[in-house]
Image: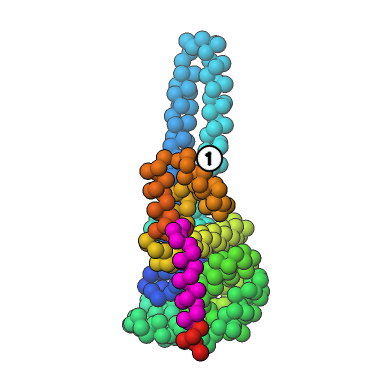
Amino acid sequence: MAIDYSRWKDIEISDDEDDTHPNIDTPSLFRWRHKARLERMAEMKEEKEKVEGGKKEVLSRVQEIEEKLSNTNLDEKDRIKLELERDNIRKQEEEYLRKEKELSDKERLAPWNIDTIGKETWSRTIVNKPKDKTSVKDASSPSVSAQPKLSEDEEHRRLLDYFSKNETLLGEMSLLKGFDAMENMLLDNPHLASEYATNWLTIEALNHAIEGDDDKMGRVAENCITIQYLLELAKSLHALSTNTNLIKSFFKKIRSAEVLYLQMYQEEVQSFKDRLRKRARDKREAYVAEAEASDKAKRVEASPGGLDPIEVLESLPEALREAFESQSMDKMFKVAETMDREVFNYHLQRCIDSGLWIPNAKEHEEKLAKEKHKEKEEGK
């Protein structure tokens, strides 16, 4: 009997923590996705409640007006006002009904996910769940699970082994454009329809984002989302994602999907790209902060008194800082004469401790010269 794939579009990318290896460089990716999905669900719920509340108020007001209009002793002027108000409220009612239908269609077409599957929605569908069947787990397709979960070490070993064996193919697939190209690649290499592949693509997309190559990042991210959708279809059907018939059916369905659903698919891709950009920005900032901290530690270590010369320079009064930056002794003497003696001595000592000011410059130069000469002699 032919398998009905018509519900494939009702399954959202899962962030199944059990299927995600903890050693992947981007474990927070799935938490972002889950958080973003919960936020979208909360926004939809809030919007739905707002529409229902507004519609209830409108209907209540219409009922009040109708009751008043039924009064035969009503003044004609008041009657006209009430009728005008009723017509205006009727328009509001139509607008609320239109919004309600729009939200209903949006929720009906919204993909299932771990937070909504099995719960009642506005459009209730009863699905007969087939009996669990024992299936053989493909080592390169961890989305189909029928045997005990592997240890972290074994899972990590398999992941790295998969990356090593398929790096060239994964690199080629990552930059493909369009469903046709992706389908051909997966039909020729069905083992790429794997959770391991999405992990590799996620890391690759993040690397492109960190490097600032937004075009490549976007293409890799979209291909990653496409495979995630395919994996969710396989999971819902208790089938192997590497099954070529399943791959063909998936791409046939996604090409003929409703316009609204394809828009939601693109929104998911865009949301994924936005999170990658944010993660890349955070990583770059962390790298910069780490590099700055390392440079500061080296400067402090090299200073005579354990102070950072850059921080000391930036903390100097403007006149004294200008004198240091210009390396003008005349300006230094002028500042020393005009500035409060206690304040000048405080900043001067900090300059000495940080290495900005060398009290006995000539002796210092002679010492450096002797050290260089000694190093040369030892190097012979």
Can you identify the residue that label 1 sits on?
97
Residue 265 appears at what percent x and percent y? Answer: 56, 61
Q: What residue is drawn where x is 37% and y is 62%? A: 306
Label 1 Cα neighbours within 10 Å, binned few <14 / some 14-19 / many ≥20: some
297 in relation to 104, above or below: below
Residue at point 46%, 83% (across, down): 160
Q: Which is nearer the eye, 349 or 44?
A: 349
Examine the structure image and report whether residue 300 is included in the region drawn in magenta. Answer: no
Quadrant housing residue 294: bottom left
Query: Which region shows up in magenta?
Result: 357-375
Q: Overall secondary structure of the magenta stretch?
A: helix
Question: Residue 295, position in %: x, y?
Answer: 46, 65
Q: Is residue 125 visible?
A: no
Q: Nearer the viewer, residue 283 or 137?
A: 283
Give the amino acid at mark 1. Leu
Q: Secondary structure at mark 1?
A: helix
